[in-house]
Image (cartoon, helix red, strand yellow):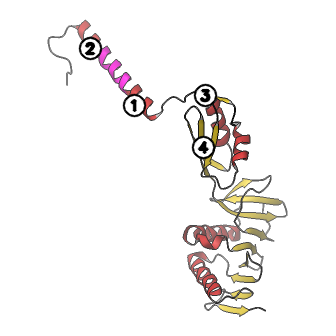
């Protein structure tokens, strides 16, 4: 299909095409400016943080190099954001600076557990993946202890079974996560869970799956309803066995 009028000369057609391309470029540039307005320059007076569960505002300032009192421009801001985005615990980071106030919004890693082995203590995130081989940062998740030999590839069936189970618990029964302080996986199979308030021990079969998560949720609710704070709960069989302690 010919988009040029029949009577146009070649030079006029070239000019028409040039003006059309220029108009399109200006339109695209305008849209980009609306979507990504230039960052104003100014002195950083106020710093606020959103979405953080693992890091404090002081730690984020130290990691990014963005601190109140400094002169801030687009280049310095982007360098600070790149440092944050390269951290294994931070999936995404967004910034909003108006020339005085800076607001950072973080999307941090989802912690599953803290794994303790003969090789050390490691944060495990959703995946599962090892978030840190240096020191644990995760809070409010169970400490996972195992005497199953591990090369930290997280490929052992018992480890994979637990992480799948605990990912389901986090997604469907998040209130359970804060009630369990420790989980143990042994060579004989199965899981032993300890309540955050010392006194309750719960035995689960190996890789309990969604059905096991539902039974665990119902059991914990029952214990709290009955004010049972000490004892043993065995969920490895078809029936739940509750042995209150003294």
The residue under label 1 is 31
Q: Secondary structure at mark 4?
A: strand
**Mark 3 vs mark 2: which is more N-terminal?**
2
Distance between mark 4 and mark 3 Cα atoms: 16 Å
**Mark 3 vs mark 1: which is more N-terminal?**
1
Mark 4 or mark 3: which is in front? 3
The residues colored magenta run 17-27
Identify the residue at image location x=69%, y=33%.
Answer: 69
Report the quarter where the N terminus lies: top left
Identify the residue at image location x=34%, y=24%.
Answer: 24
The residue under label 2 is 16
Q: Secondary structure at mark 1?
A: helix
Asked whether residue 152 appears in the rendered view, the answer is: no
The residue under label 3 is 42
Q: Is residue 246 above or below residue 13?
A: below
Q: Secondary structure at mark 2?
A: helix
Distance between mark 4 and mark 1 Cα atoms: 24 Å
The residue under label 4 is 104
Report the quarter where the C terminus lies: bottom right
Task: Between residue 15 and residue 105, name the one nearer to us.
Answer: 105
């Amino acid at each position: 299909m010919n988009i040029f009028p029949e009577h146009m000369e070649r030079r006029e057609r070239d000019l028409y095409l040039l003006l059309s391309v220029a108009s399109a470029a200006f339109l695209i540039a305008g849209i980009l400016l609306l979507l990504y307005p230039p960052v104003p320059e100014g002195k950083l007076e106020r710093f606020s943080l959103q979405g953080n569960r693992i890091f404090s505002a002081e730690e984020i300032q130290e990691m990014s190099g963005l601190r109140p009192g400094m002169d801030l421009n687009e280049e310095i801001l982007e360098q600070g954001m790149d440092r944050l985005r390269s951290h294994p615990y931070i999936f995404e980071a967004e910034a909003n600076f108006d020339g005085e106030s800076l607001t950072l919004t973080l999307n941090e890693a989802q912690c599953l557990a803290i794994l303790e082995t003969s090789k050390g203590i490691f944060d495990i995130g959703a995946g599962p993946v090892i978030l840190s081989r240096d020191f644990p940062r995760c809070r409010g998740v169970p400490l996972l202890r195992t005497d199953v030999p591990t090369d930290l590839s997280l490929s052992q069936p018992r480890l994979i079974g637990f992480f799948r189970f605990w990912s389901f618990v986090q997604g469907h029964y998040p209130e359970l996560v804060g009630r369990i302080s420790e989980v143990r996986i042994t060579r004989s199979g199965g899981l032993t869970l300890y309540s955050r308030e010392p006194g309750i021990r719960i035995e689960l079969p190996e890789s309990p799956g969604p059905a096991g998560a539902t039974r665990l949720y119902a059991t914990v609710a029952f214990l709290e309803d009955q004010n049972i704070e000490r004892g043993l709960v065995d969920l490895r069989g078809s029936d739940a066995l509750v042995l209150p302690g003294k």
